Image (spheres, rainbow, N blue to C red):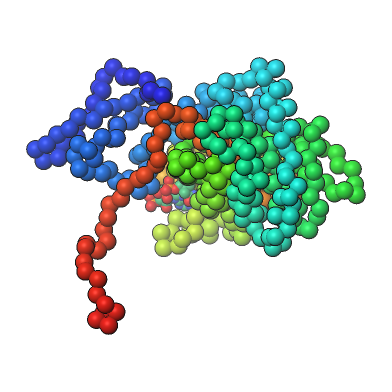
Amino acid sequence: MDAVSKTSPTTATLKVGDDSWELPILSGTIGPDVVDIGKLYGQTGMFTYDPGFTSTASCESQITYIDGDAGVLLYRGYPIEQLAENGDFLETCYLLLYGELPTAAQKADFDYRVTRHTMVHEQMSRFFHGFRRDAHPMAVLVASVGAMSAFYHDSTDISDPQQRMIASIRMIAKMPTLAAMAYKYSIGQPFVYPKNDLDYASNFLRMCFSVPCEEYKANPVLSRAIDRIFILHADHEQNASTSTVRLAGSSGANPFACIAAGIACLWGPAHGGANEAALKMLGEIGSVDRIPEYIKRAKDKNDPFRLMGFGHRVYKNYDPRAKIMQKTCHEVLGELGIKDDPLLDIAVELERIALQDEYFVERKLYPNIDFYSGITLRALGFPTAMFTVLFALARTVGWIGQWKEMIEDPGQRIGRPRQLYTGAVQRDYTSIARRK
Ligand code: CMC
């Protein structure tokens, strides 16, 4: 892949003392230009230093674009608002994987291919039975997705495009089944097999909430809500878990192992674990009159407390996903007849106060997607431990799309960052008797 070439300026000059070097500047279709430092070490003997990757583009990509200042998120050029309003999750999956929205025939074929792969190897249920019942479902998901490379070894050859596609479809199709199994196992209920005449979201809800002794009827409003939540989480360019997937994949590791690595990274509270943490925080605040106390704590540099579901590395404006999530939250509560949710009252008031507070305004801290997702998922019947599992389910397509893009790039090399070493300089070994 080649970045779009630029007319001027095409180079940046790096000056160190009396020496200077010309570094190429590359431009994308939108977004900031990048200074290409690929040859910097060879030319200057120096590395660049950017531990949190705040100024570093780690790859070239054509999948997702974020303008954090304007609060814009595009999948393959399409605004997230339009996709969430008009499309469905499998259409979004197709778009992310293939680059274009499907025609009706392509969509029907894709839905069919995904639906045919929803069952997991029967032996996997025995694998699940090895876990403790009180295991966190994210721990179970990391392990079971990693184990897919043992169960589906016939789609682990990454040099074969056909195997890459089968592995991709398998993961999109089986993730809801595995996520629902992790949930069912934790509450001691039997696993529910997928039902292929249902749409993706309804099938997932049924696998989570039906029991063999009763008929289950999918509620279209709730199915639509969960489908929209999946669309909102489907991709988010080079975030921590996606970068983890790319780095793991750069060594040639199989796709199931790479996605398991992404799930492990997503689990952290600064990333996908924030929805669980945000809901816990709202519960801990407990009532609207205690909000000022928590705002004060969030601003206190000696207190590690942060407002969970607030702030974002890239968005310095309202997270566009948070707006849609807030609307979805109201729709779900309305459909379920939940007129007064004390946690929603706290969330709305907390947002109102924080958005007027100088500390949050100055730092451009706005609600992110996780602020309202916890309330919505809880109303849908999911326990907090499942929140990040749902995030992982939805993000799987983004991880796969990014992994495929990397593998299919002819210029792809193993990712190997360098470091600023500040440890001991070379010294001689001393025998244990002579050590002080
Ligand atoms: N509450 C209070 N202060 C905050 C918060 C917060 N939630 N977030 C950032 N700040 C302050 C931070 O203390 C710092 O202040 P100062 O400049 O005075 O030192 C300033 O804002 C910049 O913060 P930072 O930690 O340098 O920003 P970052 O880009 O490294 O971190 C973040 C981004 C999302 C990890 C952080 O905002 C955070 O911890 N938020 C809460 C967790 C959360 O909601 N995460 C979900 C992210 S969205 C879903 C996803 O992508 O996974």
Q: How many marks?
A: 0
Residue sitting nearer the eye, 190 or 249: 249
Quadrant placement of the C terminus: bottom left
Q: Quadrant of the rendered structure where residue 4 is?
A: top left
Percent position (x, y) of residue 197?
A: 81, 31
Which residue is at a point 70% across and 52% down the rendered structure image?
A: 182
Q: Quadrant of the rendered structure where residue 2 is?
A: top left
Name above or below for residue 77 compared with residue 195.
Answer: above
Percent position (x, y) of residue 190?
A: 81, 53
Which residue is at a point 68% across and 36% down the rendered structure image?
A: 173
Horizontal arrangement in the rendering, residue 109 relative to residue 158 (left or right): right
Horizontal arrangement in the rendering, residue 185 relative to residue 82 (left or right): right
Quadrant placement of the N terminus: top left
Percent position (x, y) of residue 122?
A: 76, 47
Which residue is at a point 70% across and 55% down the rendered structure image?
A: 127
**In this orientation, does residue 146 appear?**
yes
Residue sitting nearer the eye, 355 or 213: 213
Residue sitting nearer the eye, 138 or 45: 45
Horizontal arrangement in the rendering, residue 307 relative to residue 334 (left or right): left
Residue sitting nearer the eye, 123 or 176: 123
**In this orientation, does residue 357 appear?**
no
Percent position (x, y) of residue 357?
A: 47, 47
Which residue is at a point 24% across and 81% down the rendered structure image?
A: 434
